[in-house]
Image (cartoon, grey):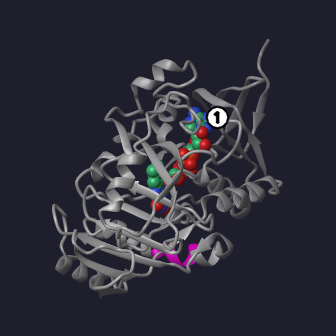
Amino acid sequence: MPQPTESYDAVVIGGGLFGVYAALHLARTQQRRVLLIEKEPFLLTKASIVNQARLHGGYHYPRSVATARMSDDHKERFTRDHQAMVHTQFNKYYGIDRYGSFTDAQQFERFCAYLNLPCERITEHPLIRFDRLEALYRTVEYTFDPFLLADYYRQQILSEDKCSILCEAQVVQADIQGEEWLIECRAATPLTVRTPLVVNATYAATNGVLQCFGLPLIDLMHEISEMVFVHIPGFEETGLTVMDGPFASIMPYGKSGLLSLSSVAYTHHQVSYDPAPAFACQKKRSDCSPGAPANCLGCPHRPASHAVKMIKQIRHYLREEARVQYFQSMFTIKSKLRANFVDDGRPTEISKRHSQPDFYCIFAGKINSIYEIERLITP
Ligand SMILES: Cc1cc2nc3c(=O)[nH]c(=O)nc-3n(C[C@H](O)[C@H](O)[C@H](O)COP(=O)(O)OP(=O)(O)OC[C@H]3O[C@@H](n4cnc5c(N)ncnc54)[C@H](O)[C@@H]3O)c2cc1C
């Protein structure tokens, strides 16, 4: 029996923050009827919630002025648009490790001055130790709350008449017919969709989807990543990021009351240099493959936690009296452009990969770069 065919003005693949924002943009500013296709049972359950929630202001990228500038460009608008979801009232410190850092105090100060980022050197802190630090700076950085943000955008898309949502559905093949894409979806009821415009916002699955459309792949690498959540009495409203290399960072996870802890040395468990994320653990699940990775959140085959090592690492910078209490870990796949391997930049790349029918690919580096969608996906 032929499968049902539906027509839409646009199809967005991937229901993370970037896919949801792209769907809203197409519906609200271009008056398009949009279908949002998500592989998992719910929207916004992967990198959009499992991240460090840093509303980047630029400090983090002394090796990539381009990423630093981009972060700063969007920070103000993101904070204004998401006031109830952004935590601004905490003390944020950047420290420079005395040993093995890719930057030093002088360079960091010059970088902040160049980008006009507030940074004041301090020599005392009741909970931070200075013996491993060359310098410590009081800075201004915020965090967004990924869970509040996810709730907000779920509500936005559910109340948008022009947007339809299809969860637990996956694109398996796509062909061109005239000036439209003909997309075959595997879902509870298999479906064929016709559309003149596709947006691929699938992050770790970017190349799997490009393959289905027969389009050139993006040069990516992938890591299974662990974010650790802890509580430190007396440190609730404090963040500390140690620069620049295999060091650790701790900061309020939005408004949750918890601190997120990451470490360049231990957050990333396994690395895949393949175009699509290929990990040994995928062999243990029939529904997880490089082209269509499953959700690591709650996966029984995720790697054993590095929480103990990460806590030990951040403790190097905290005084004895700071008690770190482990709460939980969350895992997801982090994907990066291989071109940024050396400078550690995290640009958001939106590229038009096909015209008539149109195909855009969003590869997101930073949450606050959602606005790039408005600039680059134009009628
Ligand atoms: C560990 C870590 C720390 C980070 N820290 C920060 C930070 O502090 N600050 C910051 O700004 N950014 C940070 N980032 C980056 C940021 O989280 C990502 O850039 C952003 O979340 C990507 O959003 P997205 O919507 O593109 O991807 P996702 O949220 O991963 O959404 C992609 C969606 O596509 C769906 N999908 C996949 N394949 C298919 C398919 N075939 N069909 C249909 N749907 C599909 C997935 O199920 C998923 O829901 C971090 C990322 C990680 C992983």
Q: Can the viewer see residue 156?
A: yes
Position of 328 relative to 92 (above/below): above
Does 114 sit left or right of 367 as displayed? left
Residue 350 or residue 280, whichever sits in front: 280
The quarter of the displayed image where residue 318 is located: bottom left
Give x and y (percent) for residue 148. Answer: 68, 62
At 60% across and 66% down in the image, what residue appears? 257
The residue where tag 1 is placed is: 39
Q: Main SS of the magenta segment?
A: helix
Position of 277 relative to 33 (above/below): above
Residue 320 or residue 214, whichever sits in front: 320
Give x and y (percent) for residue 364. Answer: 47, 54
Position of 289 relative to 106 (above/below): above
Residue 97 or residue 232, whichever sits in front: 232
Is residue 75 rendered magenta in the image? yes
Residue extent of the magenta highlight = 73-78
Which amino acid, mark 1? Lys
At 58% across and 28% down in the image, what residue appears? 174
Look at the numbered disc 1 and say if its residue's Cβ is closer than 8 Å to ligand 1: yes
Give x and y (percent) for residue 352. Answer: 48, 49
Farthest residue, direction front: 321
Number of numbered markers: 1
